[in-house]
Amino acid sequence: MPGSKSFAHESDAMPPDASGAVAGAQPLTLSVHSLPDPALPVDRRTRLGRTKMLLVLLVCAAPVIASYFTYYVVRPGARANYGTLVEPKPLPDAASLPLTDLQGHAVDPTTLKGQWLIVVAGGGACDETCERHLYLQRQLREALGKERDRVDRVWVIDDTQPVRAELVPALREATVLRAPKDALARWLRPEEGQPLEAHFYLVDPMGNWMMRFPANPDPSRVKRDIDRLLRASASWDTPGR
């Protein structure tokens, strides 16, 4: 074709040198684009590394955040909680809530973390209401089936009265502690007009009191609320402290 020679490659017009390479040809190179650019300032590279680390931490924490967001923020109208959701109140330290076991040894409150807790409060003499609560507390945990190992029963005695001997067998798998009533009441708050011992109190594995059940509770409705919470937290909560 006329004029076709004007489009000939430059390499065709350049004779090879003594080694056989075409003069003026560029060598083939490989570029790696995933390595940090050494031209970036050190402080900028540090900020980028920290940002990536924070993103990884957020991904790991997402299940916990999502379950609490679902329960505390997204509340579909079709779902009615039987228990009263309260603003989570962290477990106090030993100075604010001095706990002891039945032998009088000090117990660090932080040792209660790591499990869901169904808490009952009351005097050591344990009247009829107290006995019913301790019985229901045990039945509720057993009714959870395979999930019961994620829940502990806690009875906090708020006076110095000894525990009646006939109650001891039923408390074999429960945690029984003593605490001054005023200190306990600063953490767990009863419904207005009700005594401290009128309720079941639910504490999450991070040590936050977050739900209070009505006086004279309906056990089936209490269990339904606990079931929901256990399902919501299944992705991040595991049995055992």
Image: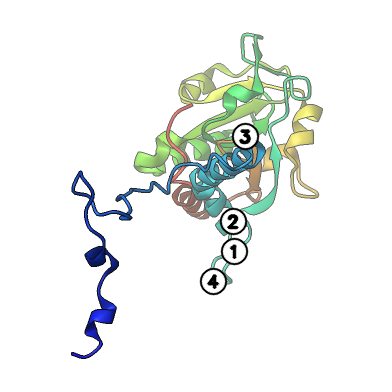
Q: Which mark is residue 6?
A: none
Q: Is residue 145 left or right of residue 60?
A: left
Q: Which mark is residue 74?
A: 1
Of tags 3 and 4, the one toward the viewer is: 3
- Location of mark 3 (residue): 207
The picture places residue 30, in percent across and down from the top left corner, at 33, 48
Residue drawn at the location 58% of the way across and 22% of the way down: 111
Mark 3, other Cα within 10 Å: few <14 / some 14–19 / many ≥20: many
Residue drawn at the location 21% of the way across and 53% of the way down: 16
Mark 4, other Cα within 10 Å: few <14 / some 14–19 / many ≥20: few
Assign a secondary structure to mark 4.
Answer: loop
- Given the image, on which type of amino acid does mark 1 rest? Val
Above or below, 9 relative to 37? below
- Given the image, on which type of amino acid does mark 4 rest? Ala
- Given the image, on which type of amino acid does mark 2 rest? Phe
- Location of mark 2 (residue): 69
Asked whether disc 4 touches disc 1, contact meaning CB atoms under 8 Å apart, the reply is no
Residue drawn at the location 56% of the way across and 40% of the way down: 49
